[in-house]
Amino acid sequence: MKLSSIFIALFLSFICTAQPGYNVISNLGMPTNHIRDLIIDNDTIVGLGMAYADSSFSQQGLLVVKFDSAGNFITSNLILDSLGDHLSIDKHWGKIINTPEGGYAMTTATFNRTSTLLVKANNDLEVEFVKEYADTINLSNFRYVIENAPGGGYLLYGSIQRPNFKNNPFVRRVDSHGNTIWFNYYGDYDKTASIVDLKVINDSTIIAAVVEDSGPSTSHSRLVSIDLDGNVKLSWSSGPQPEIGYLRKVIPIAAGGGYITYGVYVTEITINGTKMVQSTIAKLSADFELLWVEHFGNVYPLASNLIFWDIEQTLDGYFIGAGQSVIEKTTTSDFSTGWLLKFTEYGDILWERKDMGPYPENYINSHYFGGVGVLSSGNIVAGGTATKGWDKYIWLVKVTNDGCMDTILCEPITGIVERAQKEKEVMKFYPNPASKSVTVELPSALEAVEISIYDLQGRAVSRQIFDEMPIRVELPTGHLPTGIYILKAHGPNGTLGQGKLAILNGP
C-alpha cells in the first residue's frame, strides 16, 4: 500500500473517532412525529412528544421513543386515548420522568375533555396503567408537570383555570398508582398564577417556583417551600417586574444550600404594551436572600418563548440549559435554533451553541430543544423538534462536555476560574454596616462599570453607571431605609463581585 493511502486511511480513521457528536433528524413515518421533552436512562435517550396515528389526522397520540447514545432508534410507542380523544403536551407542561421502580411516568392532556392523564410505562414503553384526573368544576385542567415524590409516588403540579377564568397554582401528591393523597392550591383565587417548576430538596421539603401575573407592570415571582403534607413552610415574593425575572426554573444547590433560578427579566414595556425580556440567572440563599443576578443574551418579546425549556447538572458540577433561540439575519427573517448554554453556579457562561437542524436554510421554520440530558461519558444530548414546511421531526444533537460536536475543530475549555475566587480578588466595599455612604474599591480602573444595590426582594434601589470607573468610588446610601441589601458591581466581562450590605439610617 502506498504511503499516501496509509496516511489517508489513518486520517479518515482519526476523523471518525474524533467526532463524538451528531446533529440528526429521525422520522418514524408517523405524521408530525416529534418530541418536546427528553431524559437519559442508563445511557439510553428517551423522548416524549406527539404524532398522529394516520394521515387523516383523526387522532393525535402521545409518542414515546427510545434511542441509544449514538442516536440509533431502538423502539417507540404511540399511546392513544381509549375514548378517541386527542392527547397533547407542550414544552412547559406534559413531561416524562424515570421512576424509582423502573420504567417511565408522564403527563398529558386530553383535547376535548377537561382532563389530564398520568401514564405509567415499563422499560419497553408498554403502558402499565393510565390514571385520569377529570374535572367537572374548573374550566381547564391541562397544565400538569410531574416529579418523583420522596418515599414513592409522584408530585403533579402546574395551574388550573378556575370558574372565574383565573389560573391557580396547585400541587397534587399521588401514590405510585396515581391515587390522590392530597391536593392544594398555592395562590389567591382571584389572581392568575402558575407553578412553573418544582424540585425535591430532601425527604421532607419541596421547593416550588411560582409566577403571578397580576398586571402589565406588577407581575412578580415567588418561591414556596412545602412539606410532604402540602403545608407551606417558608415563602418569598419578589417585587413587581423583579430583577430575577419571571421564574422558569429553580435548582437547589447541594453544597451550602441555596438556589439557582432561571427566568426572563423585563427590560422594557413598549408603547403598545409588549414586554421585552432577557434571560436571567440568579442565586438566592437557603433563606431566599438574593445574592447576585446575571442578565444575558438577546432581548425579545415575552411571547416569543426564546428561553431554556430544561436545565440539568453536568458531571463536572456545572449546569446545561437547553431551549430555543435565533440566529439573527440582516436581510431576512431570524432563523429559529436549538440553544445550549453551559454555566457555573456563579453565573459564569462557559460556552454557548445555537444549532440548526440538518436542512437547507431556506427550509428552516422552527427548531428548538425541549429537553437535555447527560450521558455517563459526560457528553450532552439535547432533543426536540425540527420543522420543515408543515412537517415536524424528532431532532437530536450530541456534543461533548466542552460543547464540541467535532473535537478536531473545537478547542476544549481550560482554566476555569470560579466566581467565588474572583470576588475575593476584584472587589471590596466598606464600611459595612454603612449609613450615609459606602466605598467600593477595585484593584484597577475599568471602563463601563455598573454598581447596583438591590433589596432582598430583588428590586434595584440604586444603580450607577461609570463610563470609566476609578479604583475607588463613594456611593451615597443615606436615602435608603435601614435593612440588608445586596451590592453588586458588573464590568465588561461579567460580575466583578457582590455581597451583603447592611445599611443603618435610623428607623
Image (cartoon, grey):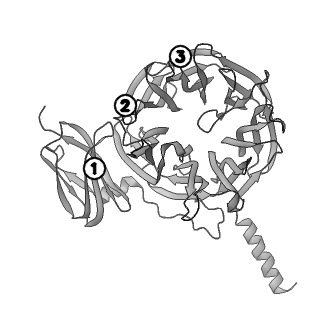
Which residue corresponds to the image point at 16% horizontal and 46% vertical from the top-left? 477
Q: Name which residue type carries label 2.
A: Ser
Q: Which residue position is annotated with label 2?
A: 237
N-term mark: 1 or 3: 3
Q: Nearer the viewer, mark 1 or mark 3?
A: 3
What residue did someone put label 1 on? Answer: 452
Residue 98 to residue 375: above or below: above
Q: Residues within 10 Å of mark 1 (few under 14, many from 20)?
A: some
* Front in this rendered view, residue 91 or 236: 91
Residue at disc 1, secondary structure: strand
Instruction: Residue type at mark 3: give it.
Output: Pro
Looking at the image, tell me whether mark 2 or mark 3 is earlier in sequence order.
3
Percent coordinates x, y for residue 287 in the rendering? 36, 33
Instruction: Label 3, secondary structure: give it.
Output: loop
Quadrant of the image for the N terminus?
A: bottom right
Could you say which disc has been placed on residue 154 in the image? Answer: none
| Image location of residue 249, percent across then percent down | 50, 39
Task: Tell which residue pokes out farthest to the front in this image.
Answer: 272
Q: Is residue 108 visible?
A: yes
Do labels 1 and 3 touch, CB within 8 Å? no
Cα distance between the residues tagged 1 and 3:
43 Å
